[in-house]
Amino acid sequence: MDKSKQSFHKPKRSFRRRLPPIGSGDRIDYRNMSLISRFISEQGKILSRRVNRLTLKQQRLITIAIKQARILSLLPFLNNERQFERTESISRATGSRTRNK
């Protein structure tokens, strides 16, 4: 057989179906913090639908629940723990300096 006449075959991939991250018994609600916290990044951002593997309807409900929880102060708008520690150390360093005249 000539190389030009050979047909190119892609190797078949076997896909393993992933389980959905939200079970049928889970209720998407702003009070369900264990569920909501799975869909927020370390920085406090809402993760995208592609990363979460959610349906469009589920992603909308999660987004609404996260926003409600933020407004009711159940979740922070931003996760500033690292930034807060950095500003504390800077203020300590600058506060310890004394001027000599």
Image: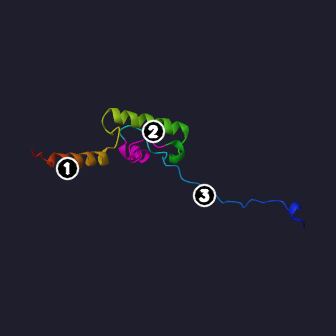
Which of discs 1 and 2 lies nearer the camera? The answer is 1
Q: Residues within 10 Å of mark 2 (few under 14, many from 20)?
A: many
Query: Left or right: where does residue 52 sit relative to residue 77?
Result: right
Judging depth in this view, the residue of 40 and 97 nearest the camera is 97
Tell me the distance, in whole angstroms, between the alpha carbons under discs 3 and 1: 54 Å
Q: Extreme bottom residue here? A: 1
**Quadrant for the N terminus in the image:** bottom right
- Looking at the rendered structure, which numbered label has been put on residue 16? 3
Judging depth in this view, the residue of 87 and 9 nearest the camera is 87
Tell me the distance, in whole angstroms, between the alpha carbons under discs 1 and 2: 42 Å
Asked whether the residues under the numbered discs 2 and 3 touch, taking CB atoms below 8 Å apart as contact, a structural biologist would say: no
- Looking at the rendered structure, which numbered label has been put on residue 93? 1
Specify the quadrant of the image occupied by residue 50: top right
Query: Left or right: where does residue 41 sit relative to residue 7?
Result: left
Disc with the residue nearer the chain's start (3 vs 1): 3
Q: Extreme left residue here? A: 101
Residue 54 drawn at (x, y percent) = 53, 44
Residue 91 drawn at (x, y percent) = 21, 45
Q: Is residue 101 above or below residue 3?
A: above
Which region is colored magenta? 32-47
Question: In the image, what residue type sits under mark 2?
Answer: Ile
Which of discs 3 and 1 lies nearer the camera? The answer is 1
Per the image, label 1 sits on a secondary structure element best described as helix
Question: In the image, what residue type sits under mark 1?
Answer: Ala
Q: Which residue is mark 2?
A: 62
Judging depth in this view, the residue of 37 and 2 nearest the camera is 2
Residue placed at 78% from the left, 60% from the top?
9
